[in-house]
Amino acid sequence: MAYLGLVALLVRDYDEAIEYFTGALGFTLREDLDQGNGKRWVVVDPPGGETGLLLARAVGDEQQARVGDQHGGRVGFFLNVHDFSATHMRMSQHGVRFEEEPRHEVFGTVAIFRDLYGNRWDLVQLT
């Protein structure tokens, strides 16, 4: 058996990323370990999810240039939820910027949003 354990997400600052993902998106802070020299191992999980995000502070010009555009402008993350309406409303109340109104597709209900850095995500409730 195999599963995707973590996905690294480049961030500008650990604390602002933790605040956004736990506050606006409702994720849980699973780990926040000091690794020395300003580096931390920070993992957040979506509610009920198996795959977490490793919030990796960008170091150097090359990584910093990719913060907010890790997928070249495409949707790169998919947040699946069981109650689209309630999640969409809660996220909107926490200042999450949606690019579109929710739409119904053959696979379910979806709306694109951007995280605090500009990365594009799909909020999805599968049919």
Image (spheres, grey):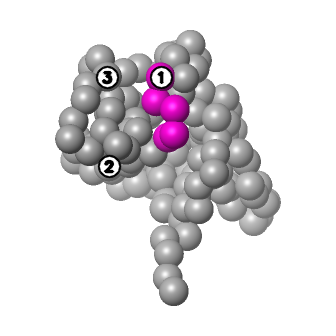
Q: Amino acid at mark 3?
A: Pro
Which element carries disc 1, helix, strand or loop?
helix
Residue 9 location in percent, x, y?
48, 53
The label on residue 43 is: none
The residue singled out by tag 3 in the image is 102
Mark 1 crowd level (few <14, some 14–19, many ≥20, 10 Å Cα): few
Q: Which residues are magenta?
A: 81-85
Q: Is residue 82 magenta?
A: yes
Q: Is residue 6 magenta?
A: no
Q: Residues within 10 Å of mark 2 (few under 14, many from 20)?
A: few
**Residue picked out by circle 2:** 76
**Displayed quadrant of residue 13:** top right
Tell me the quarter of the picture where residue 20 sits: top right
Q: Residue at x 75, y 57 (%)?
A: 31
Residue 61 rendering spot, x and y as whole percentages = 39, 51
Task: Classify mark 3: residues with Cα within 10 Å, few (<14), some (14-19) or many (20+).
Answer: some
Q: In the picture shown, does residue 89 fall above or below 105?
A: above
